[in-house]
Amino acid sequence: MSTINKIPFHTRLKSIMSERKLESYDVLVLSKCLYNKLHISLTAKEFSKYLSGATPTKEHLQLLARLFRVNEFWLLGFDVNQEYISTSEQSEVIVNELLGAVKSLENTLSQLPSQGLLDRDNTAKMI
């Protein structure tokens, strides 16, 4: 079984802060600006824990991704595009991929009778 290699959250967080030339104080001030829109608050103590290696809550992950305009999964350390995608856009992408897979499966299943693969006699012979 293969494992997924990912970069620790706190490493990505420090990296994006450095890239944007932001200190902890700056992030906390910016998070307060987003509070009116997201209704998610972030304390200095919570943020310090994240910088030290703690895993963020779902809400804080959403807040930080929005604040830095990066993909939540990228911030969590996965090897995905850094570009910010809103949660609703991420859901739409996933739904479209699933719909494509379902249509492909339906197409494959619809071809089975014409190939004689769903014939009871043939199935019994295969078993």
Image (cartoon, helix red, strand yellow):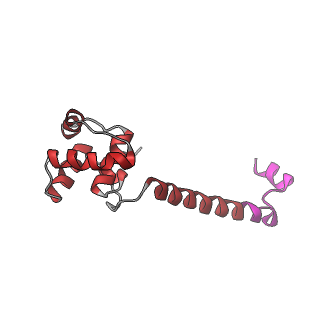
Query: Would you say residue 79 sits in the magenta stretch?
Result: no
**Residue at left offset 27%, top offset 47%:** 31
In this picture, residue 104 sits left or right of residue 17: right
Q: Locate the N terminus and report the quarter of the image it occupies.
A: top left
| Quadrant in which residue 52 is drawn | top left
* Furthest residue in direction right, as rendered: 121
| Quadrant in which residue 70 is drawn | bottom left
| Quadrant in which residue 108 is drawn | bottom right
Whether residue 78 is visible to the viewer of this picture, yes or no, is: no
Is 95 in front, or is 111?
95
In this picture, residue 127 sits left or right of residue 94: right
- Up-down: is 39 above or below 123? above
* Furthest residue in direction front, as rendered: 36
Q: Where residue 47 sits in the image (x, y, percent)?
A: 22, 38
Magenta stretch, main secondary structure class = helix
In this picture, residue 123 sits left or right of residue 19: right
Is 124 in front, or is 33?
33
Q: Where residue 118 sits in the image (x, y, percent)?
A: 80, 56
Q: Where residue 102 sits in the image (x, y, percent)?
A: 65, 58
**Residue at left offset 42%, top offset 56%:** 86
Query: Would you say residue 110 sits in the magenta stretch?
Result: yes
Q: Which residues are magenta?
A: 109-127
- Up-down: is 79 above or below 43? below
Q: Where residue 62 sits in the image (x, y, percent)?
A: 36, 47
Whether residue 54 is visible to the viewer of this picture, yes or no, is: yes
- Up-down: is 90 above or below 48? below
- Up-down: is 57 above or below 85? above
Is 89 in front, or is 95?
89
**Residue at left offset 57%, top offset 61%:** 96
**Residue at left offset 13%, top offset 57%:** 21
